[in-house]
Amino acid sequence: MVIVGIDVGGVKKGFHVSVLDLAEGFVDLRNFHTSEGIVDYMREFEALKLVAIDCPPRAQIGGPRTRLAERQINQAGFKVQWTRRRPMEPDEWMFNGEKLWKSLEKLSPQVQMIETFPTIVSSELGDCELVLPLKLLKGGQVERAGYKDFIDSCLCAWAGMRYLRGRHGDLVRMGTRLMSWA
């Protein structure tokens, strides 16, 4: 079974992607600048079960209220990057993330999608049994700039694993919003 974690950035930074094979651990880290590239890459994994994304599915919301998940996270004392309400322009990374969510609809309906919040997930790292092989980071100045984003993508994948196994604690549950096309 394979889980993909994605940290979403703006156009320059792109998407940082981690691949977690539940039988082998983390097997790949990649940086993409288009959502279509991610979709093509993920088609290589027949055992793909879940994609965990650090970004809301919509860059803007309507209505008078903020998103429930964001309010809950804020009330728990975590910093929130609020989804903007119309007519305010969305942050570039959220607009990029919305494009990603739409592109991922091309995947099999058996692939579940969840929104994750790595800041919250990282507060439970004491329970993490996974190992990230440093050789996946590949070194070099360009890659070093993306280490934090790759770590966030791994936290997304770990949250996805815990979600599938039903072993998510209160904070991970609060930091995970299920989206499914099944």
Image (cartoon, rainbow, N blue to C red):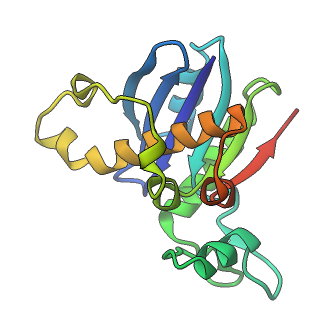
Residue 180: image quadrant is top right
**Which is nearer the eye, 126 or 120?**
126
Give the x, y percent position of residue 130: 42, 30
Q: Residue furthest left?
A: 141
Which residue is pictured at 84% across the width and 37% down the height?
Answer: 181
Give the x, y percent position of residue 125: 43, 48
Q: Residue furthest right?
A: 182
160 with respect to 11 (left or right): right
Q: Residue furthest front?
A: 126
Which residue is pictured at 62% across the width and 38% down the height?
Answer: 162
133 vs 142: above or below: above
Residue 172: image quadrant is bottom right
81 vs 172: above or below: below
Give the x, y percent position of residue 63: 83, 83
Which residue is pictured at 53% across the width and 31% down the height?
Answer: 38
Q: Quadrant of the N terminus?
A: top right
Residue 75: image quadrant is bottom right
